[in-house]
Amino acid sequence: MSGTLHRRWVDFKSAITGQDDVAILNEVERGEDVAVASYKKALAMDLPSDIRNLIERQFQGVLKNHDQVKQLRNQFRAQ
């Protein structure tokens, strides 16, 4: 649910800011930061090994997405 709310916030903010690419990417990265923190919190818990493995695999995807968004944002900032 928080992911859906965040996407709506990005849509709203992009409408207000005139769809400034850097502002949108900053907001998307902030959402990715929340996802990273959530996965870290989950991985700090005592979990059955099969669940831990699943969360660790998903966490690697979240980290990859975060890095891609950050790279895009940095590219737009450099323009």
Image (tube, rainbow, N blue to C red):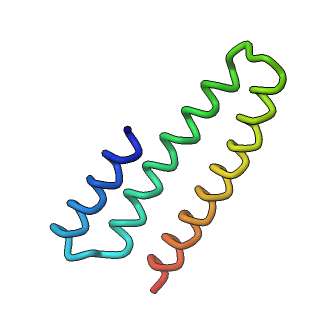
What's the residue at 82%, 26% (across, down)? 50
Between residue 74 and residue 9, name the one nearer to us: 9
Quadrant containing the N terminus is: top left
Question: Of all residues shown, which one is farthest toward the top?
Answer: 46
In the image, residue 26 lies at what x, y percent? 40, 60
68 sits left or right of 60 in the view: left
Quadrant containing the C terminus is: bottom left
In the image, residue 72 lies at what x, y percent? 53, 73
Question: Of all residues shown, which one is farthest toward the bottom?
Answer: 79
Between residue 77 and residue 1, name the one nearer to us: 1
Q: What is the quadrant of residue 52 in the picture?
A: top right
What's the residue at 34%, 48% (across, down)? 6
What's the residue at 36%, 75% (across, down)? 21
Q: What is the quadrant of residue 71 in the picture?
A: bottom right
Question: Of all residues shown, which one is farthest toward the right?
Answer: 49
What's the residue at 42%, 65% (across, down)? 25
In the image, residue 47 lies at what x, y percent? 74, 17
Between residue 71 and residue 28, name the one nearer to us: 28
